[in-house]
Image (spheres, helix red, strand yellow):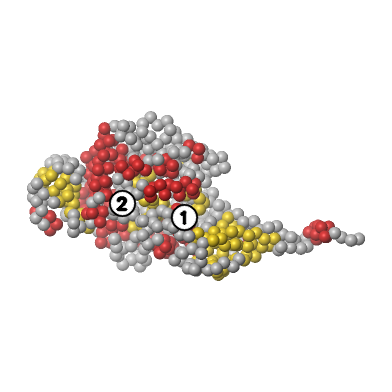
Amino acid sequence: MKLTKQLLILILVQFGIVCTVYSQKPQITRIDPTNWYVGMKNPNLQVLVYGIKIAKSNFTLKPYSGVKLKKIQKVENPNYLFIDLEISKSAKAGSLEFVFAEGNSKNTIKYELKNRSAKPQGVDQSDFIYLLMPDRFANGDESNDKFDDLNDKQADKNNPFLRHGGDLKGITDRLDYLKELGVTAVWMTPVIENNTELTDEGGTWRSSYHGYHFTDFYQIDKRFGGNEGYKKFVNDAHAKGIKVVQDAVYNHIGLTTWFYKDLPSKDWINQWDTYTNTSYKEQSIVDPNGSAYDRKICSDGWFTKFLPDLNQRNPFLANYLIQNAVWITENFGIDAWRIDTYMYNDLAFMNRCNKALMDEFPKIHLFGESWVRSVFNQAYFTKNNINFPFKCNLPGTLDFMVQTGILDGLNQNYDWDGGVQKLYQILAQDGAYQDASKNVTFLDNHDTDRYFSVVGEDFDKYKMGITWLLTLRGIPHFYYGTEILMKNFKNPSDAEVRKDFPGGFKGDSENKFTKQGRNAKENEAFDFVSKLANYRKNSEALTKGKFLQFVPFEGIYVYFRYTNNQRVMIISNTNKEEKIVETARFNEILKGSKSAQNVLNGTNLNDISKITIPAKTSWVLEVK
């Protein structure tokens, strides 16, 4: 009997023979980074390839001028393959061809190399950063509020724990509002995809509207507008002269992150025999006499049960995170990074990541969140002048200690160590930092009680604290709504300090983005912030100048910001009664100057040898 070719194949396959010869075409589910760039200072690129049993494929790279295949690496999970490439300076933009073969079947994937175009501007003392939560600021496109193909399908602005629908278009539509306020940079809580299910937090089911539960590092959440929406937002902000700060989360991921559901290797995350939470005690990391066990608990313990803790000592994961940070900066053209939960990361990894970003983008600014209780500990997690055995290379940090000093200065009675003395004493320790001007100062944020409530809704205190924020050394950031006196304590939950900005959502009864929609006191607050912020923007002393402070005396705190061309004197009376201040003790900086102008009300002081300043008042005086 003569067998046809087709019948022979069927017989051989039936008996398990030559099955590899006629195997299925290799299936690729994901390649990260999704593309790369020519002209990078670091020529090395490690591409993660994910697909069922992809490690069993034979990989080849079609010849491409300037690109070399260095190594192909496999890990515990055969669904992963890591491809190490070297992209020389001579390589041109174009498409690489990755070929995956099994038997006679193959899959050719085009991988794009693009030209670089991003030029991050960084942020510095000349900037005024506005922190907002995209979901709670403004809804510009109701069509992207919810999607049936996501794990969290809900959106209800009347429920404080669910998504409300705010998005990037809503922020873009309010860029002129931010410019009027004097803002020069926008920092948003994370915009990376959070395709998570609701989590039970304290008996309440909550969404990850805040953005800190990443599930795909290469996708902007489509409820905010997706990757293209983010590119448009960054471009529109830049066109208005507003920079963009992105929020990074390297420490943890959401439970539904694609690679957590199919780990490349067991050590991709920090594993424990039983669930182990971080201690939240940064002292164990800084302490020269501390226990290695305590350090491990703080660094490797999980932030919560629903946030798997990434093991950044795994070299493949470390490369993945670092390359993602570089890719985001280049792809979207952002200007700076704020780094979440900085002190819980592996600090050697963070040094690598920071260096990679600063090498590729010399002007970029990086600042971390290390919520600590002392200047010494805060300095540890940034570039410092202290003889620590481990040295962090982070340029700046969120200045929780200055926030503490400002709030104590406003709320405590003045005495030897209390009241405004606390603020003075904290700033007197600036020698701990290599450059304290790179620290980011603030009054409140999405994790704290709102500033106006903390100062007892006292408008005089409100203005004094804002004056300090906008005139002290450092880069000030402002929490959305503080300019219109939004208030509340985190009681019973943080939802109370994350309410929608009135006027940002359909059906809002008031629109406080407009002067007409604000009441008289809200307009007074807005105008105060705007006037000082816009003066600051054009003041050489406040944006580039040195900082000189004097010991507070009888509740009077005086400091100067100055350059060779300008001197600005900030004088604050924290007492409940008017005070007369003789200024002879400031002659080292006044140098005989006789007059000044109050920049907040435009009045001239023709004799500043003796100043009468009202109770609970701060003046900003440009010395003539």
Q: How many marks?
A: 2
Residue 542: mark: none
Q: Secondary structure beneath disc 1? A: helix
**First in sequence: mark 2 or mark 1?**
2
How many neighbours does mark 2 have within 10 angstroms: few (below 14), some (14-19), or many (20 or more)?
many
Q: Residue at x 48, y 37 (%)?
A: 142
Q: Could one spot residue 251 in this view of the protein?
A: no
Check whether the beta carbons of the residues at disc 2 and disc 1 lie within 8 A of each other.
no
Say which of 288 and 535 sits in front.
535
Q: Could one spot residue 44 in this view of the protein?
A: yes
In the image, residue 394 lies at what x, y percent?
36, 60
The picture quadrant where one finds residue 591 is bottom left
In three-dimensional space, the C-alpha distance between marks 2 and 1, rounded to whole angstroms, equals 23 Å
Amino acid at pointer 2: Asp
Tell me: residue 196, above or below residue 384. Answer: above
Tell me: residue 400, above or below residue 91. Answer: above
In the image, residue 471 lies at what x, y percent?
24, 50
Q: Residue at x 34, y 60 (%)?
A: 395
Q: Residue at x 44, y 38 (%)?
A: 140
In the image, residue 193 lies at what x, y percent?
49, 48
Q: Residue at x 36, y 60 (%)?
A: 363
Residue that mark 2 sits on: 127
Horizontal placement of 309 versus 612: left or right?
Answer: right
Residue that mark 1 sits on: 331
Q: Secondary structure beneath disc 2? A: loop
